[in-house]
Image (spheres, helix red, strand yellow):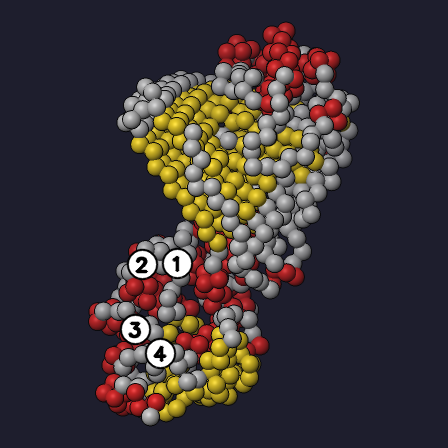
């Protein structure tokens, strides 16, 4: 294992006048919905897990799965290898289940969903009423620990696509869930994956049958609302032979002084000739300008290219969370399968991100592409960590990695930790890395053409991220750009 | 149009301009010539308000406005355009998007309505045709991978789109072969009009064969030491700048 090109940079580059006067960034999704919730008292033990399982009326095998994961978790140390400064998390002070009370008897249709909840999603720009959707995106909305509604279900069912909350899937399609749950991310995989497997509450389940091209974008919107709760959702997407699906994920949370934990697991399975495109816009509350509050985001995302010619593509725009620990990965088992990872991670103020990917080449002629764009602002720290591993039998595996860091201001840091391991001499692995800063020349050039400083920075950053943004579905690309602009506000001073 | 009075300016700790005076009337083309280090580029930077030059004394009046009191982007919106000697690359931002952002920022400042993308597209396509430039220029990221000639052409194209009142060309001819020089000069000549003035900073007389100036000034050691008509440029070409030191 090698660790090359470890860069730490600090620049005193862009001095600026206009921005100093501005208030610090406004987190527009930081409101709290006043809704009656049923929340388990804080604490974590076997009883709590039994209670979660009972509340969800789960089959025995799933309870066993949880309890087993809990035992594994208890024996694991909290990982400390990331370039993150993580304050000790008191797992006994967190509540592991919170659900809006009115939702106790799960709504049969959106008309039964609490109007306050619908209003919340409208405010977030995710109107749940199908008729209000212009773009034709099916949405599953997860509020704290439970799914509160899934749109377009009937239309999807016509072509055999299953898109439901995880809890419903456990009830309606237990054989599918049982077959694939933990097949890509086993519960013993890592500390946070084990915790998730023990206490996960809800999430989304997607199944695309053989030969079906999913007729619309599927999307899940995660929202943490309740105080002192963690969110532990689980997403499972199975794409059968020759199928295609594009899936979008968005996240927000209220502004609170306390840190909140989010530990999700996402598993993707792509059979022969199947393609899964998974896009994330992560905008969990990042904490205030002094680093108070914010979400701790410890997420395990992994896709298995099981069949030949399968393809999994991860695109992520990460602007939120106080701490981000996340490495969406691909296991390229099928011959000629390919994995892609496109990432923009922006950190501001005291945010910390350690994010990247793993591309595990097992099959012959497998291919992976990694494009990572890190933007560091304020006093933040932004690390790319990536692993490209080529197994002995993976003849003619190819990887291309491009890893660019952009620094804005003088107190931030950018770090790159690319690891490569190759056991096959026919492998071709390329790595390019750059670290740059917004230069005064670029800024002056924009100013001279009449573009004010804030707009100039947004323009330059947008250009820096272009390669990744063009991978996003259109409506998400617009949101991502807007989000970046908000996160950059008050960036320089 | 422009009245520069007794300007003193520094770049870093170094005094560069030392009492420069210049008056430019609407529609006039002024060429500023002079040896390296005389302060030619600094003059352009002072007018555009670039932050790395500091004006310590003097005044600049543009159409009744105190230019020095304005921010660089405000000056641009008031009609000041600087064609850079070394145009900057902005990766990932296509030229057309860049120009539309610039034009609309200027229009907004002037209280005009912003231009929608369809009208803008029509306008730039016509301009690029009029200026005999290739329209792939529009789609490419700003100056990224451009040859020296393409970068300078792009500056003149931007000038054409933004339609400034006062255009300053900072050594736009440097590094250009004769064909590129002609295209650039043609572009400038098309933009000449009774209400638009030009300040052309150049080291060589060559460009002035194609853009005929109304006045030629010699800038040396931070001041204008001689002014004349276009024949002064020819004289300088023959004699060089050595006589300045005598």
Question: Residue under circle 2?
Answer: B146
Above or below A149: residue A414: below
Chain of the residue displaying label 1: B
**Quadrant the C terminus of chain A occupies:** bottom right
Residue linked to disc 4: B36
Q: Quadrant of the N terminus of chain A?
A: top left
Q: Secondary structure at mark 3?
A: loop
At 54% from the left and 85% from the top, the residue drawn is: B58
- Tell me: A215 left or right of A101: left
Quadrant of residue B118 in the image? bottom left
Quick one: label 4 or label 3, which is nearer the N terminus? 4
> Secondary structure beneath disc 1?
loop
Foreground residue, A104 or B49? B49
N-term mark: 2 or 3: 2
User: Do tag 1 and tag 2 residues touch (Cβ < 8 Å)?
Assistant: yes
The alpha-carbon separation of the residues under discs 2 and 3 comes to: 16 Å
């Amino acid at each position: 294992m090698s660790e090359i090109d470890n860069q730490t940079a600090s620049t005193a580059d862009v001095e600026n006048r206009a921005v100093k006067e501005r208030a610090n960034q406004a987190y527009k999704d930081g409101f709290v919905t006043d809704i009656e919730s049923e929340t388990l008292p804080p604490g974590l033990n076997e009883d709590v897990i039994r209670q979660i399982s009972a509340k969800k009326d789960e089959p025995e095998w799933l309870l066993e799965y949880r309890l087993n994961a809990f035992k594994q978790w208890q024996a694991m140390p909290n990982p400390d290898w990331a370039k993150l400064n993580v304050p000790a998390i008191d797992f006994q002070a967190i509540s592991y289940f919170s659900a809006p009370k009115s939702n106790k008897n799960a709504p049969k249709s959106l008309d039964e969903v609490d109007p306050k909840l619908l209003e919340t999603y409208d405010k977030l720009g995710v109107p749940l009423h199908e008729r209000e959707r212009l773009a034709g995106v099916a949405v599953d909305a997860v509020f704290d620990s439970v799914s509160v509604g899934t749109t377009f279900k009937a239309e999807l069912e016509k072509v055999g696509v299953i898109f439901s909350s995880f809890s419903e899937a456990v009830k309606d399609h237990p054989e599918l869930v049982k077959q694939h749950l933990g097949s890509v991310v086993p519960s013993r995989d890592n500390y946070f994956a084990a915790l998730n497997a023990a206490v996960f509450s809800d999430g989304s389940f997607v199944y695309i049958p053989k030969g079906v091209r999913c007729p619309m974008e599927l999307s899940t919107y995660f929202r943490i609302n309740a105080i002192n709760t963690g969110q532990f959702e689980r997403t499972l997407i199975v794409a059968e032979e020759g199928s295609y699906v594009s899936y979008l994920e968005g996240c927000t949370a209220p502004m609170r002084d306390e840190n909140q934990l989010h530990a999700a697991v996402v598993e993707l399975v792509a059979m022969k000739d199947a393609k899964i495109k998974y896009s994330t816009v992560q905008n969990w509350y990042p904490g205030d300008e002094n680093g108070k509050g914010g979400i701790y985001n410890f997420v395990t995302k992994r896709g298995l290219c099981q069949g030949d010619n399968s393809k999994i593509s991860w695109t992520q725009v990460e602007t939120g969370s106080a701490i981000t620990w996340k490495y969406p990965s691909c296991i390229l088992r099928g011959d000629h399968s390919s994995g892609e990872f496109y990432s923009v991670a922006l950190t501001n103020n005291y945010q910390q991100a350690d994010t990247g990917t793993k591309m595990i080449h097992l099959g012959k002629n497998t291919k992976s592409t990694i494009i990572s764009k890190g933007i560091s602002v304020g006093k933040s720290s932004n690390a790319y960590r990536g692993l490209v591993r080529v197994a002995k039998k993976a003849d003619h595996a190819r990887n291309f990695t491009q890893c660019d860091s952009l620094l804005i201001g003088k107190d931030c840091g950018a770090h790159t930790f690319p690891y490569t391991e190759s056991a096959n001499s026919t492998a071709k692995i390329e790595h390019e890395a750059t670290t740059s800063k917004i230069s005064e020349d670029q800024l002056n050039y924009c100013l001279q053409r009449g573009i004010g400083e804030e707009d100039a920075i947004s323009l330059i950053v947008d250009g820096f991220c272009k390669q990744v943004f063009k991978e996003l579905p259109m409506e998400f690309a617009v949101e991502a750009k807007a989000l970046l602009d908000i996160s950059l506000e008050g960036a320089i001073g | 149009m422009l009245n520069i009075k007794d300007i003193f300016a520094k770049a870093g700790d170094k005094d560069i301009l030392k009492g420069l005076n210049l008056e430019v009337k609407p529609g006039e083309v002024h060429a500023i010539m002079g040896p390296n280090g005389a302060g030619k580029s600094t003059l352009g930077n002072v007018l555009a308000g670039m932050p790395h030059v500091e004006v310590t004394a003097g005044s600049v009046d543009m159409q009744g406005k105190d230019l020095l009191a304005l921010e660089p982007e405000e000056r641009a919106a008031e009609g000041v355009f600087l064609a850079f000697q070394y145009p900057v690359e902005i990766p990932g931002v296509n030229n057309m998007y860049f120009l539309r952002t610039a034009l609309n920022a200027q229009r907004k400042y002037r209280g005009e309505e912003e231009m929608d993308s369809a009208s803008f597209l029509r306008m730039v396509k016509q301009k690029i045709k009029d200026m005999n430039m290739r329209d792939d220029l529009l789609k490419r990221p700003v100056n990224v991978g451009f040859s020296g000639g393409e970068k300078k052409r792009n500056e003149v194209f931007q000038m054409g789109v933004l339609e400034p009142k006062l255009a300053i060309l900072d050594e736009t001819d440097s590094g250009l072969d004769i064909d590129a020089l002609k295209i650039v000069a043609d572009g400038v000549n098309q933009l000449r009009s009774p209400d638009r003035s030009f300040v052309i900073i150049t080291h060589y007389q060559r460009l002035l064969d194609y853009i005929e100036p109304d006045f030629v000034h010699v800038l040396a050691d931070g001041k204008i030491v001689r002014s004349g008509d276009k024949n002064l440029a020819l004289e300088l070409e023959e004699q060089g700048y050595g006589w300045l030191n005598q």
